[in-house]
Every structure is written in structure tokens, then in C-alpha cells.
Image: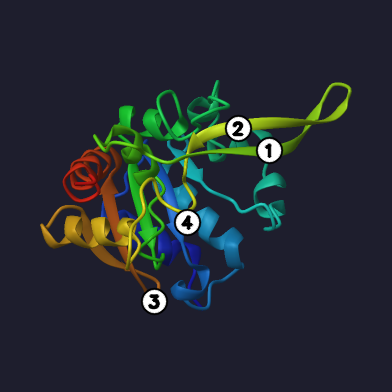
Amino acid sequence: MITADRLSREISALGVAPGDVVMVHVSLRAIGPLENGAAGLLEALRISVGHQGTLLMVLGANIPHDWVNKRPESVRETLLAEKLLRDAPWHDYYGPGSPLQKLCGAGGKILRIGANPDTTTVLHYAEYLADVPNKRRVRRHYRCKSVGGSAIRAVECLDDEDSIVPVDGEDYFARILRDYLALGRGRRGQVGDAAAELIEAADIANFGAQWMTRNLSQP
């Protein structure tokens, strides 16, 4: 059984340090048999960044969040990255003023543990930085809580589901990550049974924007 202490040592050996701002992409299954499951991973991350560090995670709408919500309020403030999320834009929520931009501006890092190669969320911010003409935009409608009950609100943003321009073949996020790592940027290691990478958020965002500008621009 893999303990939180072991995971913390391996995460620290990869380069995560106390006080860091870290966005996490992880596959629990890839890590292997983990003591206390997701809560054990969360404890390992908390130990690695310390009380002054900040963790940012993307939690799916259908995933139970009790392993975060049951933490003490003083700890949850760090885990939920309140400073990064404050005043997030309603439209273009991955663009200027977004938590992703703030992550890059804060010297944040991306910690990937056994994650799929197409799941590097900060590259959605790179889509806004890229000089690519005719980027596809979408308009979506969401039911949200409001003072008077629920309300339908519209959101307009770059197409973050089907790509900003038509592309054949492999997802370009995966291609960008592979090309980035092939240049020796980022740090690689192992956490539990999973291959892991630690990447500077601003560095891969800028690299991704340049890659998209070169490879996604239409003739």
C-alpha cells in the first residue's frame, strides 16, 4: 500500500517545494494502491506545498467532492486556491483575468501524475495567446443558482471542447506536451507507480501559444 508520506517524498523529489502554487492533473488508478485513496493523495500534496502553498485542481461535475469539502475551513482556503479563483471572468473563463492566467503570473507549476497527455488545462490559456486567425467561438447556456432561485446564463468563449480551429488526427494538446517534454523542458520522475512531470505553467503556456501559432494557422 502506497502511503501519503511516500507520495509526498516523491512529489518533493520531483521539484514541488513549500510555498509553491501547483495545478494538479492526476490519475489515481495510475498511482496504484493508495492508502486512504484520494484523501491520501490530497494529504501528500498538502505536505509537499506546506501551509503557505496553493493547490489548484479541476474537479469534474459528477465527482463527489467530500474529500475536499470535509477538510477544515482553514485548510480548504488553501486547497481551493481562493486567490486564483477570485473575480474569475464569466465569459472567456480561460482567457485574460482567468485563474489560468493568474497561475502563470504567480510562477505556478503544473504537476501531472499519470494523467492523459491531452489534459494540460493551462494550454486553454495558450489558445487565447496564440496568433491564430478565425478561432472558433461557442455560446453555451448554464443553469445557475441565484438569489431568486435558479437562472439560465449564457457563456461565450473560445471552443474549449472541439478545438479553436478544425484539426485532424491527434489532439494538439497531447502533441504540444510531447514536443515540450522532448526538448528537455520540465522535470520527469515517478510518483507511486505513475510517470510524472512537473512543468512551469507560464513556460508551457508560452510554448503552447507559439506552437499553435505555427501549426494551427490556416493557409
Task: Identify the secondary structure beneath mark 3.
Answer: loop
Amino acid type, mark 1: His
Amino acid type, mark 4: Ala
Write the residue at 44% across / 56% down.
25
Camera-nearest residue between 105 and 40 = 105
Q: CA distance from mark 2 to mark 4?
A: 36 Å
Question: Residue lying farthest left?
Answer: 183
Question: Total marks drawn?
Answer: 4
Tell me the crowding category of disc 3: few under 14, some 14 to 19, or many 20 or more residues within 10 angstroms, Cα based. Answer: some
Camera-nearest residue between 58 and 131 = 131
Task: Identify the secondary structure beneath mark 2.
Answer: strand
Q: CA distance from mark 3 to mark 2?
A: 39 Å
On residue 141, the disc is 1
x, y (%) of residue 137?
47, 38
Question: Residue lying farthest front?
Answer: 219
N-term-proximal mark, 2 vs 4: 4
- List the residue tagged with mark 3: 193
On residue 44, the disc is 4
x, y (%) of residue 201?
30, 41
> Cβ–Cβ below 8 Å for labels 2 and 4?
no
Task: Identify the secondary structure beneath mark 1.
Answer: strand
Write the residue at 43% across / 23% down.
97
Figure quadrant of residue 101: top left
Q: CA distance from mark 3 to mark 4?
A: 15 Å
N-term-proximal mark, 3 vs 1: 1
Task: Identify the secondary structure beneath mark 4.
Answer: helix
N-term-proximal mark, 2 vs 1: 1
> Cβ–Cβ below 8 Å for labels 3 and 4?
no
On residue 155, the disc is 2
> Cβ–Cβ below 8 Å for labels 2 and 1?
yes
x, y (%) of residue 96?
40, 25
Q: Nearer the viewer, mark 3 or mark 4?
A: 3
